[in-house]
Each structure stands twice: as C-alpha cells, then as structure tokens.
Amino acid sequence: MAGSILVLITKAPYGLEEAFAGLRLALATGVNGMKTSVLMVEDGVFNAVGSQRSEAVRMPSNIEATKELYDFDVPVYVVKEDMEARGVAESKLFDGLKVVPASLVRKLVAEHDLVTTF
C-alpha cells in the first residue's frame, strides 16, 4: 500500500478541469492522512499566479483549492525555471507556495511512493 503521493499539476488553471481535479485529489489524500505534496510544473505554474479571476470564467478558484491544502500540511511547490520560461515573476505568486529549482524535482519524485499527473 502506498504511503505517499506527489501530484504534478502540468496544466493551466482554467479552460480544462485537470488542474482543479489534481488539487482536489491532493486534498482528498491529505485529509485522509496520506503524505501528499503538489508540484506545479510546465504550464501548471500559472496556477500559482495570485491575480487569477475564476469568477470571470465561472469556474471554482484554483487559488482557494490550493490554500485549502495548507490546512492539512500539504506542501505546494512551483518550479522556478518553468516560471521563468513563462514570464511568471515570483512576486506575482500568492502566499504559501514554495519555489524550488528544477534540480529538486527528481528528489521530490523519489520521496513519494506514487506520482500522478494532471
């Protein structure tokens, strides 16, 4: 039985449901006591931008979905190089996220029993 899961968020926050679904999976596993971490990579780094306006597209807020994870000690990481490649400045992120170098991704994957991608 798996004791930990790393949820990779690779998709932008709105237009598709993948990112929100990944955040909800992370919440479900974290609430139930499984060691859970979230890693925003590639276009998934757009989920970390604090100026999102989910109400404009009539979608649930990925910011709120992410912040709910903090209540269950689920760390949320954002890959710095992917942010830079997409022009996302660290100053544009909302609070509570951990910006990490791409070199740390392999270590995060190795620390978890399961890895799932959204």
Image: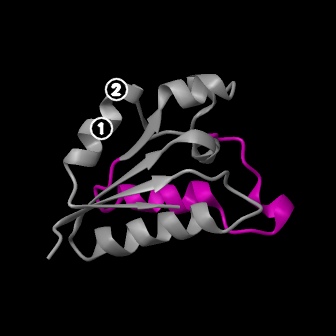
Q: Quadrant of residue 1?
A: bottom left
Residue at 28%, 55% (x, y): give it.
Answer: 73
Pick whichever, 3 or 58, lies toward us. Answer: 3
Tags 2 and 1 touching, CB below 8 Å: yes
Report how many numbered discs are placed on residues in the image.
2
Mark 2 to mark 1 CA distance (whole Å)? 7 Å
Q: Is 23 positioned to the left or the right of 53 in the image?
A: left
Indicate which disc residue 38 carries.
none
* Category of crowding for the residue at label 1, using alpha-carbon neighbours closer than 10 angstroms: few (below 14), some (14–19), many (at least 20): few
Residue under numbered circle 2: 103
* Observer able to see residue 1: yes
**What's under tag 2, amino acid-wise?**
Ser
x and y percent of residue 33 in the render? Answer: 21, 71
Residue on which the image places disc 1:
106
Furthest toward the right, the residue is 56
Instruction: Tell me, yes or no, if residue 89 can be seen here.
Output: no
Residue 26 within the magenta-colored segment of the rendering: no
At 61% from the left edge and 58% from the top edge, which residue is drawn?
62
Residue shown at the point (73%, 59%) measured from the top left:
14
Residue 38 against residue 82 in the figure, above or below: below
Amino acid type shown at disc 1: Arg
Q: Residue at x 47, y 37 (%)?
A: 78
Residue 112 x, y percent position in the rendering: 22, 55
Residue 99, x across and y down, in percent: 43, 30
- Magenta segment, which residues? 49-75
Give how far across and how far down residue 81 sits, in percent: 52, 24
Q: Is residue 12 left or right of residue 66?
A: right
Label 2, secondary structure: give it: helix
